Image (spheres, grey):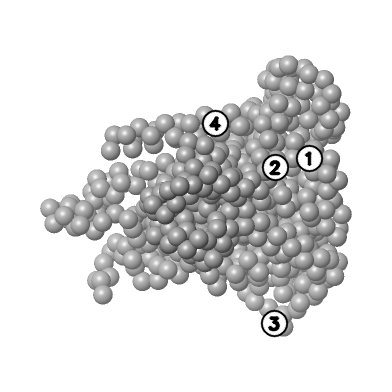
Amino acid sequence: MKKLNRSTVAAYAILIAWCLVVLFPIYTMLINSVKPQREIFRNPFLPHWPITFDGFQTVWNDGRFDLYFRNSIFVTLVSLTLIILLGSLAAYALAMWRSRWSMLIYIFFIAGLMIPIRLGTINIFQIIQSMGLTDSVFSLIPVYVAMGLPISVFVLTTFIRGLPADLIDAAHVDGAGELRIYRSVIMPLIRPAVATVVIFNLIPVWNDLWFPLIFIRAENQRTVILGVSLLFGQYQTNWTRILAALSMAAIPILILYLLMSKQFIKGLTAGAVKG
Amino acid sequence: MTQSTVASSAKGSLHGYELRRKLIWLLFLLPALLIYVRFMALPLFNSLRLSFYQGTGLTPEHFVGLDNYVQLFTNPLWRDRFLNALGNTAVFFVIHMLVQNTLGLLFAVLLATGIKGHGLMRTIIFLPATLSVLIIGFLWRLILNPQWGALNQFLKVVGLERFALPWLGDPTWALIIISLVSVWQWVGLPTMFFLAGLLTIPDELTEAARVDGASSWQVFWGIKFPLLLPVIGMVAVLTFVGNVNAFDIVYAMAGARGEPAYSTDLLGTFFYRTAIAGEHPVAIPNMGIGAAVATVMFLILLVGVSIWLLTTQRRSAEM
């Protein structure tokens, strides 16, 4: 083991101090969400016994969080499935087809990495209106798919290009068609890259506020984040409820992250090494 | 590779075979292209086009040429808010570049030494980046509450009561505080990028310098930092793109109007009000002006990304 010299001590001091700065707000949110209001104001830093789930119960019933969660899960699942399905089909074609045209199409997709889709909101909103999708969770899906395709195409094309060519050649010699090769050779091989794409898109799609805020009003179509944004104003003076609402929206992602933090960090920083 | 195998196995109908494969690849590309073009590429283009029109609601009714831009840049009603938002966005970006990316580099260097517990600390540093900006913003708004917030209570406990100020209510501090909250949330991202970059630097390089008697400080600035430049460039451009259209954090902590007194208004919130929610005092969205704001944001991004592309191209050409 390394000797505990002065610079190691300094490193620990800085990193631990920052970790506390990170954990303190989240800790305060969680412990105060299970306290009565007066205890929050009396001492916000220590847990209080017995804990109470009144805040969570009221928020769950008042806010129809059962619906919000269902909507968010539905939108996220369908969007991610389509991002993977359409992205991998396109990536396979772009990896196999080497020509000036495929290069142009590839660059066209990659350009989407640098341009935020929000800047096209006015026209997207017009399209959603003309499709009669305002006030419906279905309005979010095509937008999220379009938003997720650039990273999906980028990661998957790079990955497929790196696969050994013999595998695909052998399948061709056996007389397999493109669709067969895509389904039974490519799809099983690209699983690690698919995981990266899923994590990369899961967080922005689940956490998105912008498009639900603009497209959706109706209570039964709200996502979790939109629901929280509206409840915050309603519960202005009841901190137990506000904190319960925030915790309820944060806990699923927190658990998911703590279970698979390695994959999350790898997924969200994908492309860093490639440049 | 593929071509040669195919050529030897099916010489006769090579042409027809290649054509059919290309056709199938086009079919594979079609669904992704359709959605991407319909819901991203065309809307971006159309939003730029709409900046030359005026109309009621979101319907473009008549072509007005550059009038929306003239309004945006000269009519005091729009111009002052626009320049204010532009300046605030610049401050927001500079704080991220200076504080977030410097801290990120520092944390990465410390984590890269491989000290005990670096995995856990990495997980903690990155944690806020997985949570919704809205939740983070609301949470910090409660913590910064002048009366009941945990921060001022904490300052009282440790005897620093004179620093217990209504941070978010003060026009000179609000933007800085909101930027720092955003830094708090996102610092894990540059940390992970820099860490990945540092771990690719071969040990032999730094060992050789150490043998020659270089200090850690010299090794960092002389060897590691120059090798990290491509990652630094990428972090800078990602920070730039993320900040030019930032919206959620200000919406959560200061509302869509960037309270107090527009002191935290960013281009993102300004765009939201002009194009969608309606700007004070008329409170009716103005599609044309909104599209003009989006176009200006697009051009700002284009300039920033182009500078980055040009410098990275030159650097890779030099190598």
Please rate how many residues cluster around mark 4, counting C-alpha atoms within 10 Å: few if below 14, some from 14 to 19, many from 20.
Answer: some
Specify few, some or many for label 3: CA neighbours under 10 Å numbering under 14, 14-19, or 20 or more.
few
Give the spatial CA distance, label 3 vs label 1: 53 Å
Residues marked 2 and 3 touching at CB (< 8 Å): no
> Which label lies toward us, 2 or 3?
2
| Residue at which label 1 appears | A127
Q: Give the amino acid at mark 4.
A: Leu
- Whether callout 1 and callout 2 share a subunit is answered no
Q: Which residue is drawn at 54% across and 66% down?
A: A184
Q: Say yes or no: labels 3 and 4 on the same chain.
A: no
For disc 2, the chain is: B
- Residue B123 vertical position relative to residue A155 in the rendered view, above or below: below
Q: Residue B189: horizontal and vertical position, in percent?
A: 49, 54
B233 left or right of A153? left
Check disc 3 and report the residue beneath it.
Answer: A49
Is circle 2 on the same chain as circle 4?
A: yes
Nearer the observer, B210 or B13: B13
Could you say which disc has been placed on residue A268 in the image? none
Q: What element carries label 2?
A: helix
Tell me the chain of label 1.
A
Check whether the beta carbons of the residues at disc 1 and disc 2 lie within 8 A of each other: yes
Q: Is disc 2 surrounded by few (<14), some (14 to 19) or many (20+) residues within 10 Å?
A: many
Query: What is the spatial separation of the Cα atoms under label 1 and label 4, in whole angstroms?
Result: 25 Å
- At mark 4, the secondary structure is helix
Observer-side mark, 3 or 4, equals 4
Residue on which disc 4 sits = B302
Nearer the observer, disc 3 or disc 1? 1
Q: Residue B39 carries which label?
A: 2
Mark 4, chain letter? B
